[in-house]
Image (cartoon, rainbow, N blue to C red):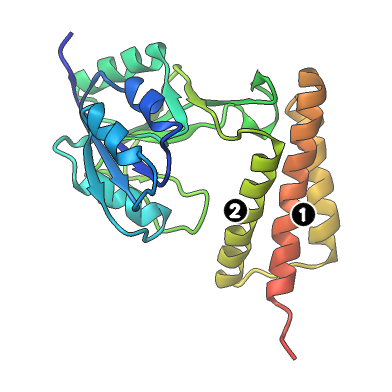
Amino acid sequence: MPKVPLTVTVITLNEAANIDACLASVDFAGEVIVVDSGSADSTAEIARGRGARVVTREWPGYSAQKNFAADQASHDWILSVDADERVTPALAEEVRRIVESNPAEAGYRIPRVTFHLGRWIRTTDWYPDPQLRLYHRKRANWPVKLVHESVAATGTVGRLAGELQHFAYRDLSHHYATMDRYTTLAAEEMRANGRSAGFFDLTLHPWAAFMRNYFLKRGVLDGVPGFIISVMNSYYVFLKFAKLWALNQKRP
């Protein structure tokens, strides 16, 4: 089957454990570009072995690195995936059909499903977690954000049905370490935007997050994993506001 006139972009740093499966899932694309931030493992070698074009570039931040990757592309339609993500066959076929039809949309949101604690999680805030990852680079880009970056499109945005699979965490320790890193970035970004945190942010927001995740978003249906994820999502909210409060305290 001919390749799709599409460029897949992946940014990496020490992703030898993930990159092969990631790139195997996008072998339908006409071009694959991996922008690596100087991995100390075999990420670059594995990527080249999969036929990807590897560009090494110092880390400027998530958004800047993803915009740089899109700038290197030979095709205008971009599918941005992370190394710990996999494109399902159903999604691949859907992307093929969309790109080959030369659509007027600026981009498409893709539902993302995460595997954690022994199961696919289709409850809580984690699902359907729509990600705008398929986009026309002349009508969309990545605005600068420290964390939880996302594509901003100029024009209409469609939705796809095929899922993007996400293997975000090896275990709960990895989950916690990732939360610790991301909440630091989130607090710094909120502070830069003039946000402050008070008592109610530290108490009501985490409580509301748990109620939303566990009951409104049906985490209760996922048993113990649903409860753990609801608690962790609530703690994420607490931690980012606690760090924001601490950042705003004056040093003696």
Residue 238's mark?
A: 1
Whole-percent x, y for residue 24 in the image: 33, 21
Q: What residue did someone put label 2 on?
A: 182
Whole-percent x, y for residue 195 in the image: 64, 68
Q: Residue furthest front?
A: 41
At horizontal 81% and vertical 30% (from top left) the residue drawn is 227
Q: Amino acid at mark 1?
A: Phe
Label 2 packing within 10 angstroms: few (<14), some (14-19), many (20+): some
User: In the picture, residue 143 is in which quadrant?
Assistant: bottom left
The answer, for residue 12, to whether it is visible in the render is: yes
3D distance between C-alphas at marks 2 and 1: 13 Å
Quarter of the image containing the C terminus?
bottom right
Q: Is residue 126 left or right of residue 51?
A: right
At horizontal 70% and vertical 70% (from top left) the residue drawn is 196
The answer, for residue 78, to whether it is visible in the render is: no
Residue 91 to residue 200: above or below: above
Residue 208's mark?
A: none
